Image: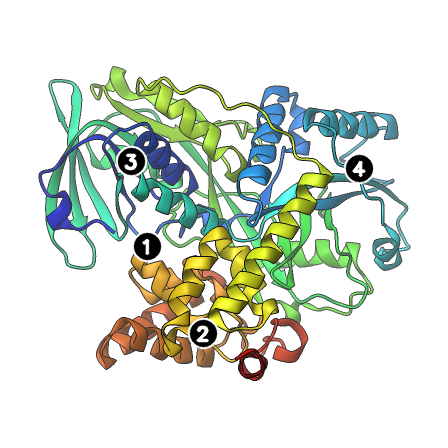
Amino acid sequence: MGSPIQTKNQSFDVLVIGGGINGVAIARECAQWSKRTLLVEQNDFSSGTTSRSTRIIHGGLRYLEYAEIGLVRESLRERERLLNQLPHLVRPLQFLLAMPKQSCSLKRSSLAIRTGLWLYHRWAGGKRPASDDRAAFERQLDNGNAWSIYSYEDAQCEFPERLVAEWLAESVDAGAVVCNHTQLLEISRSNGRVTGARLRDRISGQEYAVQASHVVNATGPWADAVIAASGISVPQMIGGVRGSHLVLPTFTGAPAQAIYTEAIDGRPIFVIPWNGQLLVGTSEVADSNTPDNPQPSAQEIEYLFKSFARLFPRSGLTQADIRYDFAGIRPLPFAPGKTSSAVTRRHVLHDHIEEGAAGLISVIGGKLTTAASLAREVGRKLGIDIPEPVNVFASPAMEEDVDSTVRQWARLVACKAKIPEGCAEAIAEWHGRHALAIAHAASFDERLREPLCPHSCHLVAEAVEAVAHESAVTLGDILLRRVPVALGACWSEECSREAAHKIGNALGWDQSRVSLELTQLEEERNQFLHPRQGQHLDPAKGCGSPASALHSETKELS
């Protein structure tokens, strides 16, 4: 992480404000093309909209209805690139499209749907055969409705926080300076052009200035507020839409595929296997409030659960079984008079030269899937000659190679760190090739081989790595984003307490620091996820190998 001492009065080619997936992708692109780059984020990287998403990497099947052919094709190309470049984090996921035949809102013929799915498959390269295993799903469906079910493929990034962490490390390796917990006070201007910014370190309270030739406002739902705070007059850019999600336990007979279906009002929603649980979302509610801590309303929670229960009446779940709920603000382009579903998901770049701020660009919209292509577009806008990457479509053989590579990494991690291969695989899936460096560090220090909590295979070594090389500062940075075990089904206050002491011991924190970090972690986690008391899984049923197994197997390996 950069510090006020490092950055005070320094000059940069590019200042990127906002450390979500778009801001980090932009900083990475600029740094890799030898631009001296500073990235600042008021909270922690990926702690805003990125961590509150539906966590899918998709072409946007629904965008076909609005004739956004270019966006769908761009998204599918980017999906394939991510599958190739980050195969441990972005994995293919089979989807079932389930439509009630009596739908009032989706009066589409079977031929139209099949044609759309065929185009979707072709534009993605048409390499993977579509699976059509519907039996488990159909057994759970509401027999009171007749359903039309179609199969297609997209992808999932279960932990976009980890994707951001990898791109962040690559940005730093390319020479970027990155500062989280750093607030923008004002974008500085002179003679109609941006000259830099005034910043405040939110941990030390120190204020300082930096110079920059170009400024990119990639703050998502905060974009209008950033411009207003700098005294730049511009029409409203962002039309905030709140999207809420529920996290539910799995149930007997739950499908392994993701489900794309209609909610009770005809809107599209997803039910997706995620992190040993089920992720249900999302709502679409206009929200013009300050986006610092969006909260699902009681009506949204009821709406999402009723939509889930309509699809799965035999699940045996009630609203009392909800484990978590969370909400984020989509920074869609301001489009008065349009329904949120009809507003484009294509990003827009607003050049502020007409408002007396040449060199300032605001990013409006964007999504997980297209962050890299957005970054290339921003780079070109800044004058960098960035070629378009060559398309490489994944094939089933390539995906088998990926699984083989991850297993190979896991075997090396298990051998080096003296941990079970099952636990090593969990580490390899989060850290990719860099898992080997984590295992190397753990092999020299018994404290680093300790599991973070009794229910987890993830190690203290991962937390130390997060601070050393992934710009984590707080316990929340570590456990909610770099090593996101606190998003798991089994996590509890006791887990937080144990992890805080183990991590604090490894990092040399004194007891007062440990206590403060623990309190702040629990506050952040509760504000984000609203965990229900008593809704944690039995560790033996859903959290992977518990620590007791890790210790016993470690003895056998050693």
Asked which quadrant contains residue 240, the reply is: top left
Which residue has dot 3 on it? 16
Upstream in sequence: badge 4 or badge 3: 3
Q: Indicate the secondary structure of the residue bearing disc 1.
A: helix
**Residue labelled with disc 1:** 469
Q: Which residue is mark 2?
A: 452
Of 531 and 50, nearer the camera is 50
Amino acid carrying mark 4 in the image: Pro
Of pointers 2 and 4, the one earlier in the residue sequence: 4
Task: Kindly report the distance in space between the C-alpha atoms of the residues bearing marks 2 and 4.
Answer: 40 Å
Q: Position of residue 323 (x, y in %)?
A: 59, 68
Which is more N-terminal, label 2 or label 1?
A: 2
Residue at the image position 52 percent from the left and 62 percent from the top: 427
The residues bearing labels 2 and 3 have C-alpha atoms spaced at a distance of: 34 Å
Question: How far apart are labels 1 and 2 at the CA level?
Answer: 19 Å
Q: Is residue 12 left or right of residue 287?
A: left
Check contact, mark 1 vs mark 3: CB within 8 A.
no
Residue that numbered label 4 is attached to: 129
Q: Nearer the viewer, residue 377 or 60?
A: 377
How far apart, in angstroms, are the residues tagged by discs 4 and 1? Answer: 39 Å
| Residue name at image x 67 percent, y 53 percent | 272
Spatial CA distance of label 4 from label 3 is: 41 Å
